[in-house]
Amino acid sequence: MIQIHITNNIMNKYKETIATTLLKRRNFKRFGLNRKGKDTSKNKLFEFYKNIIKDKNITLNGKILKLKDILIADYNTINLIINENKKTTFSKIEKELANKYYKDFRNKWAYILLKQLNISVCPYCNRNYIVNFSKDKTTAQLDHFFDKSTYPYLAISIYNLIPCCGTCNQRKSSKKVNIFYPYLESFNDSAKFSYLGIKTKDKLEKESIDFFNPNRIKFEIKAINNKEKVDENIEVFNLQNLYEEHKDIISELLQKSIIYNDSYIDELANNYSGLFKNREDLLRLITYGYVSDEDLNKRPLSKLIKDISEELELI
């Protein structure tokens, strides 16, 4: 639901991880990598390149791809490569080889990527935590946006690896889908959660709300643009049904919108000014969610909380 960004520092960490897990140091320069890192017992990256790219004649603009180009290919370049090589097929052995080297690389990269991106929540659903445990284990999975079974040459490409929760990774799997690409766009910018019980913007119909029976709470996920992609995301990740399980959050926000009017929030901010960095800090305490778009990746359900809170004029 949120856009994530590969910084120069993340790119450098990526190249270093590629080198230290898959490539002997004497070959770093050949693939456009720096010379830091430890030697590995086998030149795995060279084997990956030879068997999956060079021997299969994977090209871009009629020329055999260089490994360093496929590793850092962006979304548009990846699509060009796929279209140019769409007739290429891979054997079971070739797919297994690509998967084997991906696993060696992933064991370190998943932890590093998640730490560098500084996100705690799945960018697809904004519902499940994907926090790190240690350098050798992480709760995050890496989704291949373009599945590695069909496109094994993209198995370790940085812009093809999306950190996500196990639920979303399984739901998406190898489906050919038209969903938001997290390194380029955001579901958050194109869709809003909306509570269906509001009759007017300035008046909540309190009499019609059963606060103690969340099953009577009705909401929808509205497309504000890119409707086709919004609908596809909702279907692929089962968002409507998943969020039906969290209608108690909406019920609580309805209660809070009545309790915490502007004057009461101002009073709390004045009386406890030393407890909060700013008004947003106080609103996070009240709503239990982050209320700025750039922070939605820090806590599960923050988009739901932010959208409904805005609609209820709680924030």
Image (cartoon, rainbow, N blue to C red):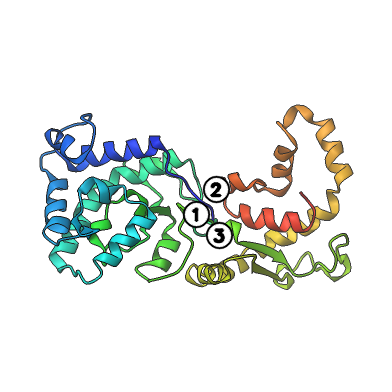
Classify 102 as above or below 37. Answer: below
From this viewpoint, is residue 136 visible? yes
Q: In front of the other: label 1 or label 3? A: 3
Image point (41%, 50%), residue name: 139
Image point (27%, 56%), residue name: 155
Q: Which residue is mark 1?
A: 123
Image location (x, y in percent) of residue 6: 42, 43
Rate crowding at label 3 as few (under 14), some (14 to 19) or many (20 or more) other CA atoms within 10 Å: many
Q: Amino acid at mark 3?
A: Phe
Secondary element at tag 1: loop
Q: Earlier in the sequence, mark 3 or mark 2?
A: 3
Q: Which residue is mark 3?
A: 187
Q: Amino acid at mark 2?
A: Asn
Q: Which residue is mark 2?
A: 297
Query: Which one is nearer the viewer's eye here, 5 or 132?
Result: 5
Image location (x, y in percent) of residue 196: 75, 70
